[in-house]
Image (tube, coloured by chain):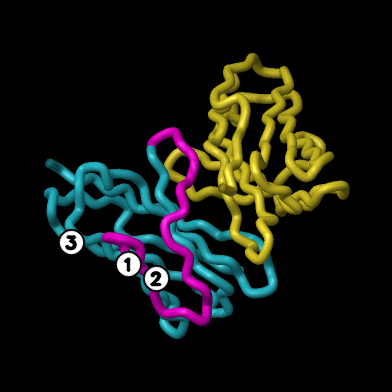
Chain colours: A yellow, B cyan
Amino acid sequence: GAVVSQHPSRVICKSGTSVKIECRSLDFQATTMFWYRQFPKQSLMLMATSNEGSKATYEQGVEKDKFLINHASLTLSTLTVTSAHPEDSSFYICSASGVAGTDTQYFGPGTRLTVL
Amino acid sequence: KQEVTQIPAALSVPEGENLVLNCSFTDSAIYNLQWFRQDPGKGLTSLLLIQSSQREQTSGRLNASLDKSSGRSTLYIAASQPGDSATYLCAGVQGGSEKLVFGKGTKLTVNP
């Protein structure tokens, strides 16, 4: 149980285009979803926290107009990287919490974004 | 602000060896601490979760300890195997927050 999926697993795009990444909780209702970014040899860094039906809370230094987060249902959150640039190339991982009786985060497999 | 440090950054051992990975955190007001495994290009697999009221957790060949007073956690791997090769991350949740703060990880290589 407590499986989280992400789609796509890998995406390559041209500079200036927008990319949408989906995060789904497959067998539980995720009241909260988190988006992380990991640059090579660096820690996972939290980008934003989203609760279903409300606006996401962004961490300091993360541009909310560039990284659009939508958490429209209890099983789906999307991250859209708008006008992507090469410096946005990274590994994006989502996690979800909401399994009854626990605040444990369950992580998706990640999405490798490469912006040319 | 919570900061998590992991030492060493990389570790290479022969198969069968017992080993210890270290994690330190700056703020002792930690709600829980979690150890993860990350394979190259993959997501995270949760290994062990230690609540602030606990001192250790065990799962198979893995044992994790937590010492809040010294700001340290260790992950002990017994009888290491080549399949244990991965990057091991520790992450702490600050009391009163849902946010996980990660260390940079220790890349473990177990040589056959």
Name the residue beneath numbered marker 1: B63
Q: Residue at x 12, y 41 (%)?
A: B112
Percent position of residue B74, x then y: 34, 68
Residue B52 counted in the magenta span: yes
Asked if badge 1 and badge 3 are on a common chain, one would say yes
Percent position of residue B67, x then y: 41, 80
Label 3: element kind: loop
First in sequence: mark 2 vs mark 3: 3
Name the residue beneath numbered marker 3: B18
Name the residue beneath numbered marker 2: B57
Q: Quadrant of residue B59?
A: bottom left
Asked if badge 2 and badge 3 are on a common chain, one would say yes
Q: CA distance from mark 2 to mark 3?
A: 17 Å
Q: Residue at x 69, y 73 (%)?
A: B96
Q: Alpha-carbon neighbours of circle 3 within 10 Å: few (<14), some, or many (≥20)?
A: some
Percent position of residue A50, x then y: 77, 49
- Whether the residues at callouts 2 and 1 have beta carbons within 8 Å, the answer is yes
Decide if residue B46 is on the left or right side of residue B100. left
First in sequence: mark 2 vs mark 1: 2
Q: Label 1 marks which chain's residue?
A: B
The vertical placement of A12 against A98, above or below, is above
Q: Alpha-carbon neighbours of circle 2 within 10 Å: few (<14), some, or many (≥20)?
A: some
Decide if residue B112 is on the left or right side of residue B37. left
